[in-house]
Image: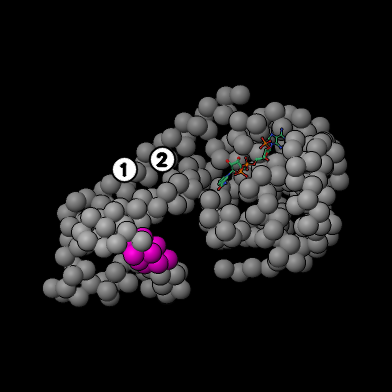
Amino acid sequence: MVRGIVPDMKTRKLSFIGAGNMTRSLVGGLIADGCDPSLIRLSDPEADRIQDLAHRLGVQILQDNRAVIEDADLVVLAVKPQVLPAVAREIADRVQDRQPLVISIAAGIRTRDLARWLGADIAIVRAMPNTPALVQSGATGLFANTHVRDEQRDLAETILRAVGLTLWVEQEEQLDLVTALSGSGPAYFFLVMEALQEAATKLGLPAETARLLALQTAFGASRMALESDEDAATLRQRVTSPGGTTEQALRVLEDGGLRSLMEQALSAAARRSRELADQFGAQ
Ligand SMILES: NC(=O)c1ccc[n+]([C@@H]2O[C@H](COP(=O)([O-])OP(=O)(O)OC[C@H]3O[C@@H](n4cnc5c(N)ncnc54)[C@H](OP(=O)(O)O)[C@@H]3O)[C@@H](O)[C@H]2O)c1
């Protein structure tokens, strides 16, 4: 993963609306990457509650969404999707005057709906991060609308790279698949870890031993796959000796329809993502 801020970033004023988990991770990552905290401002209804944190990070926190974006070059919308229509309408005239790049990380809000609430042809990047972003190991899909310039793409990428890997998609509908794969994906891997742990415990290992072996194996396999030039299928074949133990286990998983189940699972998640976007967009 390439880290570090683009040079342009050093003078850009960044505002975050909603100072919850994701904003704190993003801001922490940006400062660790060398971003000047005095250029960062946050707004949140609970500003008083997190004054200490803001002070520690060296960023400013306000209670007023309109004030926080006054001279911003980049505005990150990091409130829950249900709250976003009201927040967007509240800041619309300021955004139209200032024309900052708007990055929305709200799950399931389409750029055309956000543009409608903001009331003009605004440069919008929609980002779909996932929960491991909270431990700086996220995977984020990004989509830019037609108003986003190249240097704004770089800025958006820098912001999200502060919490992990970033990848662009060219069509917004592909973000429904990103949601199904990496957005919901951590839960699939948690389920696999849980199932492995349960099975090993049932078959005779102490629960804590089973838990740690399952977790470390998931971590090790993922790290190997990320660091290797070879694809997952090749790595799998490498650890599968003919007539060995792994071959036996993989046969059970293949015969049980694991691949088809994964396809069905992703289809169901992507369908739900589209439904939720329709619902939010109707507001
Ligand atoms: N966490 C993830 O892993 C993840 C992954 C993908 C996408 N996302 C998206 O990222 C966004 C933020 O998620 P999060 O986990 O950071 O949520 P969060 O911790 O609940 O943070 C949202 C913050 O916004 C504040 N807020 C509520 N109403 C507001 C308003 N009108 N103006 C300004 N701030 C307001 C909330 O304050 P109160 O608590 O007082 O309401 C809270 O501090 C969501 O849209 C979510 O869909 C998150």
- Residue situated furthest top in the rendering: 283
For the residue marked with disc 1, what is the amino acid? Gln
Specify few, some or many for label 1: CA neighbours under 10 Å numbering under 14, 14-19, or 20 or more.
few
Work out whether residue 67 or residue 112 is closer to the camera in this orientation and state it.
67
| Residue 82, image quadrant | top right
Q: Is residue 232 left or right of residue 34?
A: left
- Which part of the image, by quadrant, shows the N terminus? bottom right
Figure coloring: one colour
The magenta span reads 209-219
Point out the tag, 2 or 1, that comes first from the N-terminus.
1
Work out whether residue 253 or residue 127 is closer to the camera in this orientation and state it.
253
Measured in 3D between alpha carbons, the distance from the residue under mark 2 to the one under mark 1, in whole angstroms, is: 9 Å
Is 213 within the magenta? yes
Which residue is at a point 66% across and 33% down the rendered structure image? Answer: 84
Location of residue 131 with respect to 64 vertically, above or below: below
Residue 269 is tagged as 2
Tell which quarter ligand 1 is in. Answer: top right
Residue 264 is tagged as 1
| Helix, strand or loop at mark 1 | helix
Query: Residue 31 location in percent, x, y?
Result: 73, 62
Q: Is residue 189 left or right of residue 28?
A: left
For the residue marked with disc 2, what is the amino acid? Ala
Q: Main SS of the magenta segment?
A: helix
Which residue is at a point 71% across and 55% down the rendered structure image? Answer: 27
Which residue is at a point 37% across and 38% down the rendered structure image? Answer: 268
Q: Is residue 69 visible?
A: no
Specify few, some or many for label 2: CA neighbours under 10 Å numbering under 14, 14-19, or 20 or more.
many
Query: Residue 44 location in percent, x, y?
Result: 74, 39
